[in-house]
Image: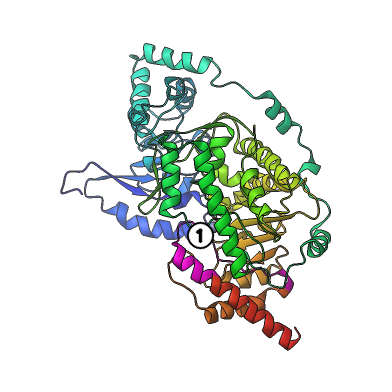
Amino acid sequence: MADLGAEWVQLDEPSLVKDQSEADLELFTDLYKPILATKHGLKILAQTYFGDVRDSYDLLTSLDFDGLGLDFLEGAETLDLVKSKGFPADKTLFAGIINGKNIWKANYDKKLALIKQLPVADDKLVLSTSCSLLHVPYTLANEPQLDEKYKRYLAFAAEKLTELTDLETILTGNGDAILKANQALFAQPRYEENETITRQVASLKESDFHREPAFEERAAIQKKEFNLPELPTTTIGSFPQTREVRRNRSKFKKGEITKDQYDEFNREQIKACVEFQEKIGLDVLVHGEFERNDMVEYFGEQLEGFLFTSNAWVQSYGVRCVKPPIIWGDVARTHDMTVKESVYAQSLTDKPVKGMLTGPVTILNWSFPREDLSPKETTYQIALAIQAETLALEKNGIKIIQIDEPALRENLPLRKSDWYSRYLDWAIPAFRLVHSKVQPSTQVHTHMCYSEFGDILDAIDAMDADVISFEASRADLTLLDQLNRDHFKTHVGPGVYDIHSPRIPSEKEVAGTIEKILKKVPLNNVWINPDCGLKTRGETETTASLENVVAATKEVRQELAHEGR
Ligand code: GLN
Ligand code: ZN
């Protein structure tokens, strides 16, 4: 780098925002001393983000770094640290003041007030984004369809760079007009408040978050109500989104078919799906989710308060991208969102059909959240909307309702010491709020995937669902030991095969997996299901796999009966 003429080298060390032990800090020192002893004329920047460096601030300021990059957005204690401990005069502060994770335009007055508090000389201050811009879409220039009344409040990656130069212009005395325009924008309310919903959230009581009667009593009632066989079989909700299903949706979006034609096609899909599930002998059926493009977008599009972009893609993982909706205002439910499809599916069979909803924490975590309302309050607004939908399903005869929370773990704070005090303390109640008002005989399921759950099983149990299905087959069912260790109370379907591969598990293999589960989880608590939704799979492998799952379950049931277990 020095040979190539670089002035600065940035070393990213975001892990410093996690809880650091003495040993961690010693290791950091041992690793960096030699690097900092031979700089070859380069300036070295230690860059952190996604939190504050409360455990390592003293160390970082004492080592021979030339610059420190600190996050003033997510770093709850960053400003306090810098103010109370001071900042070394010989180092440059790279101050992360523009939010690199969200899409809202910055309030310049607030940013200037923050900058004024920083104890550094002008020539030792660099204004920066709080983290890399990987998490936000590229530019608003790609959103010609979005009305200016919305766009003026937004800043994507390119616009955030302009915000940094705007602030510099203002600070150097040439930005009066820029500042006035920004002040004018923030002087008016951005959206019209929904007073009903804000009042509802404000008046929530402790009892709104608790379902009665307690778990065991409900379990006994539900056992009688459904009379399901041992090891009940079910799926996670979606069935393959075939080319025809996607073509139907795109034709409707382009206006080539009417809403009636669109719905009619989906009804045919639901009918075929229910017939298939009955034929192979699953116990709890689903409608198949053919009307849904994405599990968050589907609800966002129907709820009040969401805004959608055309091209605001961000990376999800690898080459996969998502287009998160923006939570623009207060979230409210104005009409039934899933009742029609579930009721139709239930009308076709005597077996219970599971209603299928996306949970409030996942809707929040997979959207761009508001900055003028806390995540907790926003999630409670969403939870009340999903609660109303849950009750509507129940009122219309749907007796098992699944509320998916695949993204629950995703926003867990990086500092373990913050897990309960800054996240789970409201995220878990938000889920309970959704189902606290249903009848004891209504069975509430949830589903989680994409993450490890072993270390938050107590929080998951506290969600107080009746049944949970986990994506666990890929982790070689290590989750089973953890469930066993923690005396997990919720009935559980640990996922008997991995749906992320087209491979068809044999009957024998599935039977073996079920036996493994039964070694760790009490028989009466076990459900049998694939480990996630089937929408990305083809029809052929789905049919074969599910047939094998049902056959394997029947085989194990027979063995159990034979052994008198
Ligand atoms: N019910 C959803 C489905 O089956 C759950 C999706 C998910 O776990 N991400 O598609
Ligand atoms: Zn899943």
For the C terminus, the quadrant is: bottom right
Q: Residue furthest bottom?
A: 563
Residue 29 position, x and y percent, is 41, 56
Mark 1: C-beta under 8 Å from nearest atom of ligand 1: yes
User: Is residue 533 a member of the stretch shown in magenta?
Assistant: yes
Q: Residue at x 52, y 57 (%)?
A: 239
Give x and y (percent) for residue 291: 53, 46
Q: Position of residue 428 (x, y in %)?
A: 67, 49
Using residue 96 as the reference point, say whether residue 422 is left or right of it. Answer: right
Which of the pair 494/481 is nearer the observer?
494
Q: Which residue is mark 1?
A: 534
- Determine the secondary structure under disc 1: loop
Q: Is residue 555 above or below residue 271?
A: below
Of residues 266 and 437, the one nearer the viewer is: 266
Identified at 42% across, 20% down, the residue is: 148
Q: Given the image, on which type of amino acid does mark 1 rest?
A: Leu
Residue 118 in view of the camera: yes
Rendered location of residue 269, percent (x, y)? 53, 53
- Please tell me whether residue 414 belongs to the stretch shown in magenta: no
